[in-house]
Amino acid sequence: MSAGWVTVAAVGVGTVLLKAVGPVGVAGRQLPPAAERVLELVAPAILAALVVTETFASGRHLVADARLAGVGAGLVCVLLRAPFWVVVLCGALATAAVRALQ
C-alpha cells in the first residue's frame, strides 16, 4: 500500500474516532449552557466560511467575479425576506447575467 493510501486510511479512522467521541463522551449528560450556545453557532459559522471561500477565492487567490454578484443579489432577497427558492433563483440569475455580459 502506498503512502497516499495509508494517509487516507489514517484520516478516515481519525474522522470516525472524532465523530464517536462526542456521543460516547457526553452520553446521558447535559452540556453546560455555555457549551450548548457555542455548539449552536458552529453550523452557521461553517456555512458562512464556505460561502465566503467559494465566493471570493479561486485557488489561493482572492477574486471578485460573477459569483459576487450572485451572493449580493441573494443577500438583497434575504433582506427583503423572500422565500428561499427566490433567493437561490435571484442569485443564479444575477451570476448568469454577469457572466453573459463578460
Image (cartoon, grey):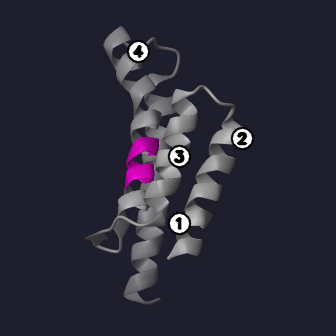
Residue 51 in the magenta stretch? The answer is yes
**Mark closest to the chain's N terminus, 4 or 3:** 4
Q: What residue did someone put label 3 on? A: 73
Q: Position of residue 100 (x, y in %)?
A: 59, 73
The secondary structure making up most of the magenta span is helix
Q: Which residues are magenta?
A: 47-52
Q: Is residue 48 above or below residue 55?
A: above
Q: Residue furthest front?
A: 101
Q: Which residue is mark 1?
A: 98
Mark 1 or mark 2, which is nearer the start of the sequence?
2
Disc 2 crowd, CA 10 A, few/some/many (<14, 14-19, 20+): few
Residue drawn at 56 percent across, 61 percent down: 95
Image coordinates of residue 23 in percent, x first then y, are 51, 31
Disc with the residue nearer the chain's start (4 vs 1): 4
Which label is found at residue 85?
A: 2
How far apart are the two marked residues, 4 and 1, measured between alpha carbons? 48 Å
Q: Which residue is rendered at x = 55% and y = 32% of the image?
A: 78
